[in-house]
Image: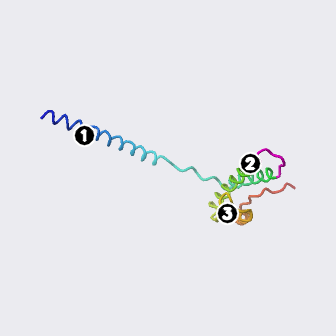
Amino acid sequence: MRTFALLACALLLPTIAGYAIVAAVRGGHRLSERRYRPPPAEPLERLAATLRRLRSELEATEATPGMTAKNHHVRALRGAYLDALGDACTRVGISPPPGGDRARQADIYRTEAALREHGMDVRETAPR
């Protein structure tokens, strides 16, 4: 009888330990999900300032002749601008320009005009 009890313990102990590990991992995930709070939304004024800054950097980079790796800089700035433009569109409630990173310039202009109609000007005003 003692041998049977030892054999049962030897077979059940790894299974019980495995279930305990799985339960601990799942419990840890649940605790971390409870503590996670999404970051507060960026204020619209700050988002508009970011859009103006990225737009002016993009225009300056496009106008700079002989720049090393100019195509890479322009593509990176354009992608960052389009990401910020999409965030602004989501916040205001309009549709972002279609095409993602390959959006046409005309669609970007239409989106900028729609944002302007909602009170968010993304173009830098010229100094007087």
As drawn, the label of residue 12 is 1
In three-dimensional space, the C-alpha distance between marks 3 and 2, rounded to whole angstroms, equals 21 Å
Residue 63: image location, x then y, percent: 83, 52
Q: Is residue 60 left or right of residue 120?
A: right
In three-dimensional space, the C-alpha distance between marks 1 and 2, rounded to whole angstroms, equals 61 Å
Q: Earlier in the sequence, mark 1 or mark 3?
A: 1
User: Quick check: is 69 in the magenta stretch?
Assistant: yes
Which residue is disc 3 drawn over? 97
As drawn, the label of residue 119 is none
In three-dimensional space, the C-alpha distance between marks 1 and 3, rounded to whole angstroms, equals 60 Å
Identity, as a three-letter code, of the amino acid under mark 2: His
Q: Earlier in the sequence, mark 3 or mark 2?
A: 2
Q: Give the residues drawn in magenta, as a range.
A: 63-70
- Residue pictured at 72% horizontal, 66% vertical: 110
- Residue pictured at 23% horizontal, 35% vertical: 10
Using a 10 Å C-alpha cutoff, classify the residue at mark 2 as few (fewer than 14 neighbours), some (14 to 19) or many (20 or more).
Answer: some
Identity, as a three-letter code, of the amino acid under mark 3: Pro
Q: Is residue 89 left or right of residue 20?
A: right
Which residue is disc 2 drawn over? 73
Q: Secondary structure at mark 1?
A: helix
Q: Earlier in the sequence, mark 1 or mark 2?
A: 1
Q: Secondary structure at mark 3?
A: loop
Q: Secondary structure at mark 2?
A: helix
Residue 67: image location, x then y, percent: 81, 46
Residue 68: image location, x then y, percent: 79, 44
Using a 10 Å C-alpha cutoff, classify the residue at mark 3 as few (fewer than 14 neighbours), some (14 to 19) or many (20 or more).
Answer: many
Residue 89 or residue 7, whichever sits in front: 7
- Residue pictured at 20% horizontal, 36% vertical: 7
